[in-house]
């Protein structure tokens, strides 16, 4: 594992590269804007910690009003719980009995919720909790059009009934449309979520028909939360990326009524080789994830081309007056996708006062980095 | 950081998922075949440890005849040196004075070599080594057509002269064509390397004209090493991926005369949600890198579709008799690209006796995981 090569009080200009850097001022504005949005729209905010994987950031979110956090993996739940986070929702299915033992043990230490989408999952979860003598809130996940996890909305009542029959606490519906987050057009996203809300209402009706109360519908991400919040159905939203705003989300046409978020996560890189018409930086896709496209160069009119695992290639744009950076110069990259970029690093370097003139204020461990189990 | 959830003696079927698993039998055959190739063709073998980032594997390669290993980052060199690897070539440029201090310190503990491609890089390296009172072999990197790092071949003599003028040990030429490795056609790769060899000869002539001896030309990767080895010019080859053979390399048309390599690196995944016509596994691109495309499902006639950071979606192919796996079933994924996949994990789980019926024989830490600086 790599050690962090930055220290509190260090000028941002001196942080060794590549480094994962948070612009603390921008991040805090994002944090506040989302908290205010949730408050104004009377929805609970449970940010997704799969984005940041960091207890310090989860604590800041909760201090600003979040009811707790979501995670996708048992590893993440364990890592955040060990670092003091006391209210975690595992918004994903677990079918492995060994992992369910871990879930059940953890449920004895914090307030834990989990999603299910199969009878087998319910039975195994019930067995694990019974064996450990612990309890967890259980959400039935429905497929609202993503086509990944979740049962058909009309089947929600039957599975909720099974949850209760197995002695578990049915807490509501998990209804998340992942792909909708990244549709570029605002109208397109709104239409997809309108359809999703209709499916979630059908699921709610199915639960009612089974004689059960659906106390909460939870879901939504950074690309669509304004629509779930406006639905009158969703009681909780789960955005994660708003905290950092990656290049991919910034490429979305903004939704009406959404707070303005700013880029707050950067990979600092350095030119380590220089050709006549290109510069090579020391950050490739071992430093930033490229599943959602390449990073952009922050506040410089330069194109970033894929240079492989360890390099990035910078060129000036045709017709641009921009000057290629020189050997040793720093550039700041806005990652294409924040979540898997964070997962490549062991620490955040938090900078106060801007990227160029600022100073390192904090270094936060990314406790759940690599926590895929 | 995630803990490993496997143990020596455990049946492979029981390894908790997602897990990065080595088929030790296949890996050792790859190891031996490459070592035999290098011996038969009288070239030194210096495998690239950017692939595996693991001291145990570097040791096995050296025990089989490798002269040492290459790395791309100072972090990697430090991590492997700390774990006992004594001969490391940093086949990349370092321009940051702080990093060069680290290089100079390390050069006092192991046999170290490094690449340069600029006068500034030479001056700073010389200053750091002089300050530390240590020495390193210095290779001048030339651009043989990749268009990333390296100077023009005709400029090699002048830079080699600068190396010597600065009191450094000029050791030869670094001449690697990264993009050539992944060209699909065997003839296409051969043609590109023929051109690269021509450029390397021009660089060698430039060095001779500067009155210096070029003792070694080093380079090559898993896709092209047969051509560099046959060139009569390259004295050392640097393949890395041969050890694991990822999906991308297996998609190459084989080169005549190349040893046959086998898939030896897998991500074990588990079905954790099951629809009518698709199954969802617990491994997405936080478990396997997708920069070179999606993984393939090993020995099953199933298509793997991108399910995002934490999920993969399996479907049967139209017309195929394959059956979708059930909830809880394991599947083994062959990563699209081994190097950045390894960089997502903290441990290898080494299995002996095959993936299905085998047993965990070893667990190796990936010491340089995340070592991007």
Image (cartoon, coloured by chain):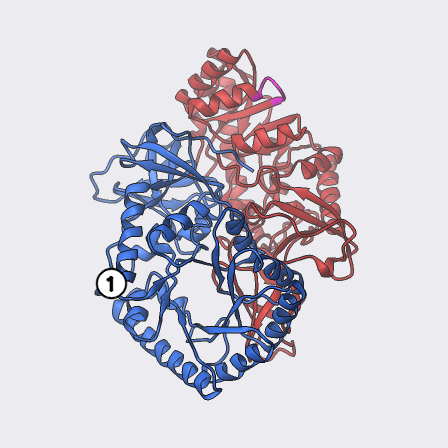
Chain colours: A red, B blue
Q: Residue furthest front?
A: B133
Question: With respect to residue A336, does A67 lie above or below?
Answer: above
Question: With respect to residue A32, does A332 lie above or below?
Answer: below
Quarter of the image where one finds residue B299: top left
Residue A123, percent from left and from top = 42, 17
Identify the residue position indicated by label 1 in the image: B40
Residue B154, percent from left and from top = 46, 85
Quarter of the image where one finds residue A226: top right
Please indicate whether residue B333 sits to the left or right of residue A67 in the image: left
**Residue closer to the observer: B30 or A265:** B30
Q: Residue at x 48, y 54 (%)?
A: B86
Please identify the quadrant where the C terminus of chain B is shown.
Answer: bottom right
Q: Is residue A301 visible?
A: no
Please indicate whether residue B363 sits to the left or right of residue A176 in the image: left
Please identify the quadrant where the N terminus of chain B is shown.
Answer: top right
Q: For label 1, count other residues whose C-alpha is less than 10 Å away and answer few (under 14), some (14-19) or many (20+).
A: few
- Find out whether residue A109 is within the magenta segment: yes
Quarter of the image where one finds residue A15: bottom right
Residue A119, percent from left and from top = 40, 20
- Find out whether residue A260 is within the magenta segment: no
Please indicate whether residue B189 sits to the left or right of residue B210 in the image: left
Region in magenta: A106-111
Please indicate whether residue A208 sits to the left or right of residue A3 in the image: left
Question: With respect to residue A338, does A133 lie above or below?
Answer: above
Magenta portion: prevailing SS class: loop
**Residue closer to the observer: B355 or B289:** B355
Q: Chain of mark 1?
A: B
Q: Is residue A356 visible?
A: yes
**Residue closer to the observer: A247 or A351:** A351
Helix, strand or loop for disc 1: helix
Residue A145, percent from left and from top = 46, 39
Q: Residue furthest bottom?
A: B209
């Amino acid at each position: 594992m790599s050690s962090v090569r930055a220290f509190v009080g260090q000028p941002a200009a001196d942080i060794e590269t590549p480094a994962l850097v948070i612009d603390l001022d921008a991040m805090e504005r994002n944090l506040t804007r989302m908290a205010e949005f949730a408050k104004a729209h009377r929805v609970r905010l449970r940010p997704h910690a799969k984005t940041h994987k960091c207890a310090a950031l989860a604590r800041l979110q909760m201090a600003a009003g979040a009811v707790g956090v979501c995670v996708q993996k048992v590893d993440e739940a364990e890592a955040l719980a060990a670092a003091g986070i006391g209210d975690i929702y595992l918004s994903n299915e677990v079918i492995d009995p060994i992992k369910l033992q871990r879930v059940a043990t953890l449920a004895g230490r914090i307030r834990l919720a989990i999603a299910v989408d199969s009878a087998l999952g319910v039975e195994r979860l019930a067995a694990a909790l019974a064996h450990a003598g612990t309890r967890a809130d259980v959400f039935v996940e429905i497929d609202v059009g993503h086509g990944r996890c979740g049962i058909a909305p009309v089947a929600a009542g039957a599975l909720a009934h099974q949850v209760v029959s197995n002695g578990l606490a049915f807490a509501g519906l998990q209804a998340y449309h992942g792909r909708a987050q990244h549709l570029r057009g605002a109208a397109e996203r709104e239409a997809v979520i309108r359809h999703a809300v209709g499916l979630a209402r059908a699921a709610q009706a199915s639960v009612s028909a089974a004689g059960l109360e659906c106390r909460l519908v939870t879901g939504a991400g950074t690309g669509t939360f304004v629509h779930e919040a406006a639905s009158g159905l969703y009681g909780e939203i789960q955005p994660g990326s708003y905290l950092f705003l990656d290049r991919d989300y910034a490429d979305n046409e903004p939704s009406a009524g959404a707070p303005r978020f700013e880029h707050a996560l950067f990979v600092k890189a350095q030119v380590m080789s220089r050709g006549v018409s290109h510069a090579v930086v020391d950050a490739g896709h071992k430093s930033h994830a490229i599943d959602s496209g390449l990073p952009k160069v922050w506040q410089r009119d330069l194109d970033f081309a894929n240079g492989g695992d360890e390099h990035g290639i910078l060129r000036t744009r045709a017709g641009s007056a921009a000057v290629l950076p020189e050997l040793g110069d720093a550039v700041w990259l806005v990652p294409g996708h924040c979540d898997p970029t964070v997962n490549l690093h062991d620490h955040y370097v938090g900078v106060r006062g801007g990227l160029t003139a600022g100073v390192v204020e904090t270094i936060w461990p990314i406790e759940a980095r690599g926590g895929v189990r």
